Amino acid sequence: MNLWNIQKLKNDLANQTINQRDLFIYYLLTGIIAAFLFSPYESNSFYYYQEEIYKWIDWGFTNILYLLMIFLCYAANDGKNGKNFLERIISLEIIIIIRYFVFFLIPYEIVHSLFFDGGIYSDLSNLIGTISFSLILLIRIFSCMKDIQTVEN
């Protein structure tokens, strides 16, 4: 595990001597750093009129589900004995996020803007939408990772 020595990390990556557990830790650390960078305290990614408590609940659930997804996918990929963890999880995330952006987020935003935007239930609707989207991603990416492992075995 190289957290400071870039030259050693480059050599490990070039020689393909880096193990799956280290790749998991790198990816997990990336998720943790992103969680702190996008906290409601520091970020403008939340609606300006959104209640403070909803911002924190949204942030907490989203990050817990994302980190849980990383752990579950690592376990589904057979842990330290698995193969190509990063390649698999990143590829699955990108494709599934694109699909559910089209099939979930766009329809949700249309319904939200027509019925809830600016109303008394706007914050609750945003919270439910975000948690639902995160939960769908967790379930789909985890199930795809298990399917890959099943096909491989």
Image (cartoon, rainbow, N blue to C red):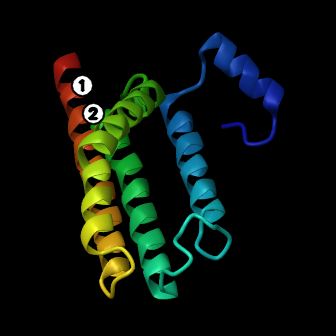
- Residue at figure coordinates x 28%, y 70% from the top left: 128
Q: Residue furthest front?
A: 114
Q: Tell me which corner region of the image, top left, top right, bottom left or bottom right, holds residue 58.
A: bottom left
Q: Report, in whole angstroms, how far the alpha carbon at label 2 lies from the one at label 1.
A: 5 Å
Q: Is residue 138 visible?
A: no
**Viewer-closest of 8 and 105:** 105
Asked if residue 29 is positioned above or below residue 87 in the image, the reply reads below
Asked if residue 127 is positioned above or below residue 92 in the image, the reply reads below
Asked if residue 87 is positioned above or below residue 56 in the image, the reply reads above
Image coordinates for residue 139, horizontal then vertical, percent: 23, 48
Secondary structure type for disc 1 = helix
Secondary structure type for disc 2 = helix
Q: Is residue 145 left or right of residue 87?
A: left
Image coordinates for residue 5, horizontal then vertical, percent: 81, 34
Assess whether mark 1 and mark 2 are in contact (beta carbons under 8 angstroms). Answer: yes
Question: Label 1 amino acid?
Answer: Ile
- Residue at figure coordinates x 45%, y 32% from the top left: 90
The residue labelled by disc 1 is 148
Image coordinates for residue 75, horizontal then vertical, percent: 32, 42
**Viewer-closest of 55 and 102:** 102
Q: Is residue 64 visible?
A: yes
Q: Tell me which corner region of the image, top left, top right, bottom left or bottom right, holds residue 94.
A: top left
Q: Is residue 10 left or right of residue 82?
A: right
Quadrant placement of the N terminus: top right
The residue labelled by disc 2 is 145
- Residue at figure coordinates x 35%, y 50% from the top left: 69
Question: Label 2 amino acid?
Answer: Met
Image coordinates for residue 110, horizontal then vertical, percent: 29, 57
- Residue at figure coordinates x 43%, y 81% from the top left: 54
Quadrant placement of the C terminus: top left
Local crowd size for mark 2, using a 10 Å CA cut-off: few (<14), some (14–19), many (≥20)? many
